[in-house]
């Protein structure tokens, strides 16, 4: 598992006296009501930075306002302290309007910490004096700040052969100011944050790797090596084993490429058997998706290296499971294939015998993800599980319906609600969607058990078609949820919050939260 490039520890020293290169404070924008009784352009200082404000004789927020600070969420304004405090630079990060009678939401803190640490690239040692509540919400707030700081400084190593003079190195060390640095709960949050963000960074690295370097056999080798080092059980099925085992969906998609498909199974068993509950994670691992015979348009196709983001998230989450050791058995299934057009590609009109025994009529070879996922889901159900969480960059319909930040969730209603709650808690929002009977009816086939997509190639309910198809391969006794991350799995825009350009690591943190939830509540 990738270690965070930035180290993190807690301090309870007065922030004004910390020997760091920069100190980060929070500022709020004003509401209309607050502006009525405040000086024009003044900001509201967030808690945690009182001693720093005192050192500036009460002129800190006014000075920041003169520099253009508005307190808008994610905005970072730097101010030279000129010896006023120990740190030479104060960086004020915007937190948006001040919440009424409450601390900022964890996601607000997570994004602020990420934006600030990224903006301070080039500094070696940075301290965060952000507002942390002193009540039952304190652990969640501290977790958010720690995660944001560790993720915001991420940078993919890349492939440049020449030094980049203007490229500043990420912050090496972050200190988080807390009331009691030795408190056990706070230290536990740091330990967890290091494991969780390490998994997210691993997922990002895999997604950002050039597709010629991470074809299915290579991807399987990398995941298997990391899993063995972490102490997980590992099983890798190559193309011969897949063909012999009847994994028709994986074989069909992978047969068009000279780089053959794989299925990687990762197993974690808690000491003593844990709670007795079993969780299965399934992730789509299309290492590159041309669309196959139903080829995609050229514009933007390079982003299809991210079509294995689901498998990357599942593999990385399993590495974190090995480190965190939850009291529930967890098994990960990563079907991998490269969807290429060639003389051996599967075709529209083909009928494929799936691992479950069902027959699928192929109408669109660009709907390949559901083919490999169906085999992996059927294998997971056969092996035995109580809860199945599957994640994939499955449909453009998810992006159209919910945008680039919110995942779509389909499956067992109660489990979908748990996914929604987990997404809200982790800052990886997800929204439950229905699986209507009329969508299933539109996928009836005259020659097979089901068509791979709507039989008239109608894109209405496109995201729902993916969920309806996958439901056919889940056994009745398994609670399941399909998490479509076509939008949030890859960020093509400018860095924002703790997201950088490229792979995001969504939904690693959601999956780990769900595993903890199952371990605690069944």
Image: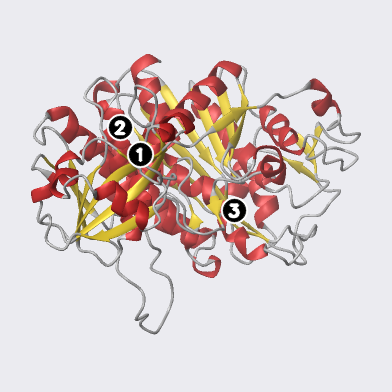
Residue designated by label 1: 109
Q: Whole-percent x and y of residue 293?
A: 79, 60
Q: Residues within 10 Å of mark 2 (few under 14, many from 20)?
A: many
* Apparent side of residue 427 relative to residue 476 in the rendered image (left or right): left
Mark with earlier residue (1, 2): 1
Q: Secondary structure at mark 2?
A: helix
Residue designated by label 3: 307
Q: Between tags 2 and 3, which lies in front?
A: 2
- Examine the rendered structure and indicate whether residue 18 appears above or below residue 419: below
Q: Secondary structure at mark 3?
A: helix
Identify the residue shown where x is 88% and y is 38%.
Answer: 455
Q: CA distance from mark 1 to mark 3?
A: 30 Å
The reply to whether callout 1 and callout 2 are in contact (CB within 8 Å) is yes
Mark with earlier residue (1, 3): 1
**Residue 270 picture quarter:** top left
Q: Quadrant of the C terminus?
A: top left
Q: Whole-percent x and y of residue 184?
A: 13, 29
Identify the residue shown where x is 80% and y is 33%.
Answer: 450
Identify the residue shown where x is 48% and y is 35%.
Answer: 281
- Examine the rendered structure and indicate whether residue 444 appears above or below residue 94: above
Identify the residue shown where x is 75% and y is 34%.
Answer: 465
How many numbered marks are there? 3
Q: CA distance from mark 2 to mark 3?
A: 32 Å
Query: Residue 167 versus residue 36: which sits nearer the camera?
Result: 36
Q: Whole-percent x and y of residue 331?
A: 43, 34
Picture disc at residue 141: 2
* Apparent side of residue 285 relative to residue 294 in the rendered image (left or right): left
- Examine the rendered structure and indicate whether residue 158 appears above or below residue 5: below
Q: Secondary structure at mark 1?
A: helix
Q: Whole-percent x and y of residue 478?
A: 55, 20
């Amino acid at each position: 598992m990738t270690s965070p490039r930035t180290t993190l520890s807690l301090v309870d020293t007065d922030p004004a006296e910390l020997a760091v290169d920069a100190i980060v404070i929070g500022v709020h924008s004003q509401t209309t009501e607050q502006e009525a009784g405040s000086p024009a352009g003044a900001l509201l200082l967030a808690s945690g930075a009182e001693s720093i404000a005192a050192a500036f004789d009460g002129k800190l927020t006014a000075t920041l306002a003169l520099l253009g600070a508005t307190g808008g969420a994610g905005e970072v304004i730097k101010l030279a302290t000129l010896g006023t405090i120990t740190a030479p630079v104060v960086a004020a990060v915007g937190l948006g309007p001040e919440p009424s009678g409450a601390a900022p939401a964890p996601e607000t803190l997570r994004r602020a910490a990420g934006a600030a640490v990224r903006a301070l690239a080039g500094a070696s040692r940075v301290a965060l004096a952000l507002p942390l509540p002193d009540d039952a919400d304190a652990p969640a707030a501290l977790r958010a700040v720690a995660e944001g700081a560790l993720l915001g400084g991420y940078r993919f190593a890349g492939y440049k052969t020449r030094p980049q003079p203007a490229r500043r190195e990420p912050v090496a060390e972050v200190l988080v100011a807390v009331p009691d640095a030795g408190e056990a709960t706070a230290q536990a949050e740091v330990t967890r944050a290091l494991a969780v963000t390490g998994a997210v960074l691993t997922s990002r690295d895999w997604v950002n790797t050039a597709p010629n370097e991470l074809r299915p056999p290579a991807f399987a080798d990398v995941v298997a090596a990391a899993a063995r080092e972490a102490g997980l059980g590992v099983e890798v099925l190559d193309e011969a084993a897949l063909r012999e085992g009847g994994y028709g969906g994986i074989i069909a998609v992978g047969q068009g490429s000279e780089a053959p498909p794989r299925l990687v199974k990762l197993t974690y068993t808690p000491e003593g058997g844990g709670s007795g509950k079993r969780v299965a994670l399934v992730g789509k691992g299309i290492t590159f998706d041309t669309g196959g015979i139903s080829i995609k348009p050229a514009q933007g196709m390079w982003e299809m290296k991210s079509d294995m983001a689901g498998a990357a998230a599942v593999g990385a989450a399993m590495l974190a499971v090995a480190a965190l050791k939850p009291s529930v058995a967890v098994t990960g299934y990563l079907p991998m294939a490269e969807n290429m057009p060639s003389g051996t590609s599967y075709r529209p009109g083909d009928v494929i015998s799936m691992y479950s025994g069902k027959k699928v009529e192929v109408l669109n070879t660009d709907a390949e993800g559901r083919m490999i996922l169906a085999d992996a889901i059927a294998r997971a159900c056969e092996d035995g599980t109580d809860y199945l969480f599957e994640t994939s960059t499955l449909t453009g319909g998810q992006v159209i319906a919910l945008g680039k930040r919110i995942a779509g969730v389909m499956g067992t209603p109660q489990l979908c609600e748990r996914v929604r709650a987990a997404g809200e808690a982790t800052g990886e929002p997800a929204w439950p969607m229905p699986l209507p009977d009329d969508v299933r009816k539109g996928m009836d086939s005259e020659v097979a058990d089901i068509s791979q997509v709507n039989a008239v190639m109608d894109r209405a309910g496109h995201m729902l078609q993916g969920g309806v198809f996958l439901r056919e391969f889940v056994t009745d006794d398994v609670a399941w949820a399909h998490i479509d991350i076509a939008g949030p799995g890859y960020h093509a825009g400018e860095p924002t919050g703790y997201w950088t350009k490229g792979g995001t690591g969504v939904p690693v943190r959601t999956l780990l939260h769900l595993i903890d939830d199952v371990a605690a509540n069944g």
